[in-house]
Amino acid sequence: MKPMLTMIVPVYKAEKTLRRCLDSLVHQTLQDMEILVINDGSPDESQRIIEEYAACYPQIRYFVKENGGIANTRNFALEHVEGKYFGFLDSDDYADAAMCEKMVAAAEKAQAQITVSHFEWVYPDHRRLEKEGPYAPGKEMMIQLFATLWNKIYLTEWVRRSPLRFPDGYRYEDACFLYCIVPHVQRLAFVDEAFVSYVQNPASITHTNNHEVKDMIHVFEVITETYRQAGLFEAYHDELEYLHIKFFLGNSFLRSVQIEDAQDRRQTILMGWRRLNEVFPRWRRNRYLKTLPGMKNRYFRTVAGWNILLYAALFHRLKK
């Protein structure tokens, strides 16, 4: 009998946090599950820890592969999933013991292709709840989706039947995968609880402010081209446009301003600015930009070619 759920743990240089992550999975209340650990050629003591846990917990399967990066590791894992559903938990995060049981129950009840829960940001001195959903499939999902993989589970055969995979060799692979799969989603389920503790570590790869920030340019090229090839670009034009605004004036911009080298910082910021204006030259007319509330949208509306580097200098100084 195949398990109901496969939880995938990609591992690279995770010796300090891996035990906490695995402990949170081996003590799940859901019995009918497997834990698929993929060692992406980690040079530290991670493999010894994986073998230690695998010897004690038969629900753990593991693979050791040549280092290929996070997207490559996620694609590798998808080939080896045995569960009806699968999910991800990154090795520096950890999960509530009831997560898997409650997520699977919600997925089964709704016959959902994707099941979504909340999560908590964990900082050294406090925690912050992040709520996601509910939203409808399609355009509403595109706008409201929080592009993280690990607060969701996915119907395995549905994903495997699609041509969509993670962009090998690039960061922001989670955003690429999720935004590309949105038009194919018909059934969603939501669990009104937070299960994953998303640990914020300034030294982690998520917070690396260097050339990897530029990967977002490539990822958004992939997203846009995917919609064009599917004949969906016009139907999702406003949503794709707003995503470009949100990422290249928000997420990516705020990471770019932290690059220490002034020339590299300037080039990276202007790459995103050019991308936004070349693909969506009329982005200021975007209906979501005009109608959605919040300080971020108010800030987006003020950005222009003459002041974007002034904003960059200000945010760099403030470390925002």
Image (tube, grey):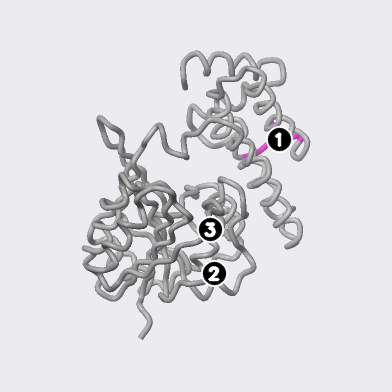
Between 68 and 75, which is closer to the camera in this rendering? 68
Between 90 and 269, which is closer to the camera in this rendering? 90
- Magenta residue span: 281-287
Which amino acid type is marked by label 1? Leu
Does residue 6 show up magenta in the picture? no
Q: Quadrant of residue 35?
A: bottom left
- Residue name at image x 55 percent, y 25 percent: 298
Please give the residue where the numbered disc 2 appears in the rendered image.
159
| Left or right side of 236 for 107 | left
Mark found first going from the N terminus, 2 or 3: 3
Q: Residue placed farthest to the bottom in the image? A: 1
Mark found first going from the N terminus, 2 or 1: 2
- Residue name at image x 39 percent, y 52 percent: 90
Task: Identify whether 217 is placed above or below 270.
Answer: below
Provide residue 211's location: percent of width, then percent of height.
61, 34
- Count of marks overlaid on the render: 3
Q: Dot 3: what SS?
A: loop
Please give the residue where the numbered disc 3 appears in the rendered image.
66
Does residue 286 show up magenta in the picture? yes
- Residue name at image x 37 percent, y 71 percent: 5
Please give the residue where the numbered disc 1 appears in the rendered image.
276
Which amino acid type is marked by label 2? Val
Task: Identify whether 256 is placed above or below 4.
Answer: above
Q: Give the numbered dot on residue 109.
A: none
Work out how far the residue at label 2 is from the one at label 1, CA to CA, in angstroms. Answer: 30 Å
Provide residue 127's location: percent of width, then percent of height.
27, 37
Q: Residues within 10 Å of mark 1 (few under 14, many from 20)?
A: many
| Left or right side of 155 for 248 | right
Provide residue 290's location: percent of width, then percent of height.
61, 33
